[in-house]
Image (cartoon, grey):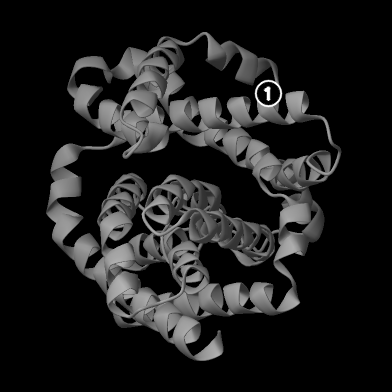
Amino acid sequence: MQQQINNIFERGTLYCIGIGGLAFWLGNVIPLFGKTMMGLILGIMLRGLLFNKQSERGITFCAKTLLKWAVMFMGIRISLSELQALGFRMFFLIVLSVGIVLLWTFLVQWMYKKNSGLIWLIGFGTAICGSAAIAATSPFVKKEVEDMGTSIAIVNLLGIIGIFLLPTLSSLLIFEPFQSGLWVGSTLQAVGHVAASGEMISLQGGKFAIAVKMGRVFCLLPLILWLGFFSNSNQPSGSHEQSISQKIKNLWYLWGFIFFIFVNLYPVPEIHSFIKNISSATLVIAMVGIGLLIDLKNILTQSKLAIFYAGILWLFQIISCGVFVYFLT
């Protein structure tokens, strides 16, 4: 704990906090990109200026340890009451849509095993909640540091395209506002993307789209529980399988995640708002740290493959969810 406190005052950590503040402001000015994406972009852009041996320790602390704190605070975003309001039938459709995308992700990474880490991150972000899902699952995925930055960038890019694409397709297919909201909420990656696209449908459709989206966010809980206990990505190469007690100890941020889900059950809006702000701030600062660790040349090298993988997954998601909406509602 004392070591973590000391890391807060490292030069690299202070860089990440300062740039994170700028990313927060720019994310509010340009909400289409969002604060998380803005933090990653600024980190990548400023790597050549700020990353060196003196700053590496603090930057690494933000990209790895602070990211786990951000994952822990994400639990406050999951509302069990909103989930209950959806009803069993609708929640079943949401779980089915998420599960099918994850199954398709498994098949794609099986075909392209060389880039399995990148594909899994893109799949998690596509299936559940964009950048937040990628950040939450990344500690459990064997990957290169560039994989996380690339997956966040590509998933957000497709989400921006989807803001305009899905309302247009819904109109062409003559969907009812309820059906359009279900399609948007079960397909677009980030909550901001869903809200923006939902406004183009109708007030009723937009509200329902956000409710469906929050149902997908809930799926993050069983996913990271599964990954936490069955993933060996954090073990040193050649080490023996971790014991249950070791895994419980190493997954402290997962238990914190669950704790904050229950905190959200108590109707104290001020506390909820405060913790959500901490969650957003730590995630943005962690994204800056990840950006500062990423070599832009490596991202550009793998960007074509990433677009190919993400395109396959997203196209499958749009079609499968569209079929569900058309035939099951």
Q: Amino acid at mark 1?
A: Phe
Q: Is residue 20 left or right of residue 294?
A: right
Number of on-image labels: 1
254 versus 33 height, above or below: below
Q: Secondary structure at mark 1?
A: helix
Q: Quadrant of residue 114?
A: bottom left
Q: Position of residue 285 (x, y in %)?
A: 45, 25
Which of 129 and 254 lies nearest the eye of the viewer? 129
Q: Is residue 200 above or below residue 173?
A: above
Q: Quadrant of residue 126?
A: bottom left
| Foreground residue among 237 and 121 | 121
Q: Which residue is painted at 43% across and 21% down in the image?
A: 57
Q: Is residue 91 above or below residue 281?
A: below
**Image quadrant for the C terminus?**
bottom right
Could you tell me residue 277's position as x and y percent? 60, 26
Q: Residues within 10 Å of mark 1 (few under 14, many from 20)?
A: few
Residue 84 falls left or right of residue 186: right
Give the percent coordinates (x, y) of residue 127. 47, 66
Q: Quadrant of the N terminus?
A: top right
Direction from residue 301 to residue 157 in the image, left or right: right
Residue visible at 58% across and 80% down? Answer: 96
Q: Which residue is mark 1?
A: 274
Residue 317 in which image quadrant:
bottom left
